[in-house]
Image (cartoon, rainbow, N blue to C red):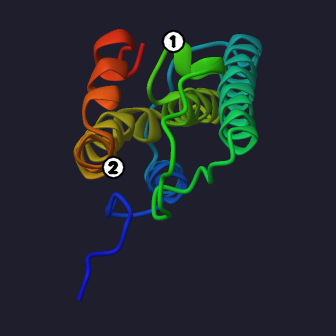
């Protein structure tokens, strides 16, 4: 039987971010831990700002993907390398945007545990999603994808 044509990521990336964010906030709610030590105004301003930038980046990248005729879901086949719009600056603008949105929500919620869990989330995204996508895309597109990788950074 032929292998399915997709990257075989470990889980949908938005669910990875959401699960860890909710787990962190849940732990903070159950255990009386100290907050981040920021004033409410600073916390909310910084949190909303980061969330807004992250959400904007995710939506711009997803829209760019769709305009290119591609589906942004990594469990579907990829038929073209999208290298325009935010993809000129980062190979993973949706994951970067999700990380910024997560960071904003964790700060806004004053959740030290959620903030600490961002590091394992990024490791899971890096090794369970991005590395798998990169192997898939390099196998499927070869030299054009390697040229894209050489030209554009993975995260920033």
| Up/down of 10 relative to 66, above or below | below
Tally the marks. Answer: 2
Q: Quadrant of the C terminus?
A: top left
Q: Residue at x 38, y 62 (%)?
A: 6
Residue 52: x percent and y percent?
Answer: 75, 25
**Occupied quadrant, residue 8:** bottom left
Q: CA distance from mark 1 to mark 2?
A: 19 Å
Badge number at residue 129: 2
Query: x, y percentage for residue 12?
Result: 47, 60
Nearest to N terminus: mark 1 or mark 2? 1
Secondary element type, mark 2: helix
Task: Give 2 or 26, whichever is nearer the viewer.
Answer: 2
Where the N terminus falls, by quadrant?
bottom left
Q: Given contact means CB atoms under 8 Å apart, are the residues at marks 1 and 2 in contact? A: no
Occupied quadrant, residue 138 = top left
Residue at image position (50%, 64%) is 76
């Amino acid at each position: 039987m032929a292998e399915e044509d997709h990257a075989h990521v470990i889980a949908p990336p938005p669910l990875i971010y959401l699960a860890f964010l909710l787990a962190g906030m849940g732990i903070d709610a159950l255990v009386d831990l100290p907050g981040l030590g920021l004033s409410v105004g600073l916390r909310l301003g910084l949190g909303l700002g980061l969330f807004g930038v992250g959400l904007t980046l995710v939506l711009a990248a997803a829209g760019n993907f769709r305009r290119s005729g591609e589906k942004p879901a990594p469990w579907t086949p990829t038929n073209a390398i999208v290298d325009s719009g935010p993809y000129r600056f980062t190979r993973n603008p949706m994951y970067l945007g999700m990380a910024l949105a997560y960071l904003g929500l964790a700060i806004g919620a004053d959740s030290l545990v959620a903030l600490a869990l961002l590091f394992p989330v990024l490791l899971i995204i890096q090794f369970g999603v991005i590395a798998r996508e990169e192997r898939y895309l390099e196998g499927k597109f070869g030299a054009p994808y390697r040229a894209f990788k050489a030209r554009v950074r993975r995260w920033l």
